Image (spheres, helix red, strand yellow):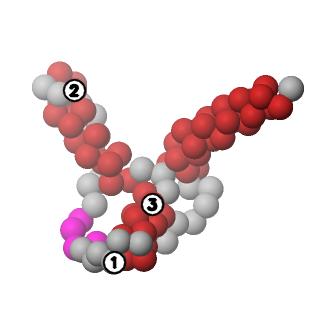
Amino acid sequence: MGKKVFQVTLTIVFLLIMVLPVLQVMTRMLPEPRLSEKRQLTSRPGLTVSSFLSREFQNQFDAYMNDNYGFRSLMVMLNNQINITIFRVTR
């Protein structure tokens, strides 16, 4: 019985980890801190037939999602804190 409960719990945790960032992008349910980056984040590309057929849209949308993924700023801040606290490295 204990093994089955562990497997179900692990499955639910895994699904939450996969689904929560997508929900955050769609709904912005939780406020995220703003990062002060030295670059401009990619804006959402417009979809046209020619950009889709030339695969330009796919590349631009990939860059957009990399910059605007749910909980990205929290993950960047967590990564920076781990680098400073554990590895004593700043970048």
What is the quadrant of residue 67 in the picture? Answer: bottom left
View extreme (right): residue: 1
Residue at mark 3 to residue at mark 2: CA–CA distance: 31 Å
The residue lying toward the viewer, choosing from 12 and 31, is 12
Please determine whether, in this image, residue 66 is positioned above or below residue 7. Answer: below
Instruction: Point out which mark residue 52 bears.
Output: 2
| In the rendered image, the vertical position of residue 36 relative to residue 78, given as above or below | below
- Toward the left, the furthest residue is 54
- Amino acid type shown at disc 3: Met
Predominant SS along the magenta part: loop
Q: Position of residue 11 (x, y in %)?
A: 66, 31
Residue drawn at x 52%, y 47% is 21
Q: Secondary structure at mark 2?
A: helix
Contact between marks 2 and 1 (CB within 8 A): the answer is no
Question: How far from the left and from the top, in percent, is residue 27?
Answer: 58, 50
Q: Is residue 26 above or below residue 74?
A: above
- The type of residue carrying mark 1 is Arg
Give the position of the C terminus as an image quadrant.
bottom left
Q: Are marks 3 and 2 in contact (CB under 8 Å)?
A: no
* Residue 70 appears in the figure: yes
Assign the N terminus to one quadrant of the image: top right
**3D distance between C-alphas at marks 2 and 1:** 44 Å
**N-terminal-most mark, 1 or 3:** 3
Going from the N terminus, do you reach mark 2 or mark 1 first? 2
Residue 75: which numbered mark, if any? 3
Image height of 44 relative to 15, above or below: below
Q: Which residue is mark 1?
A: 88
CA neighbours of label 1 inside 10 A, class few (<14), some (14 to 19), many (20+): few
Q: Which kind of residue does numbered mark 2 sit on?
A: Phe
Q: Position of residue 82 (x, y in %)?
A: 42, 69
Is residue 44 something one can see in this rendering? no
Q: Are marks 1 and 3 in contact (CB under 8 Å)?
A: no
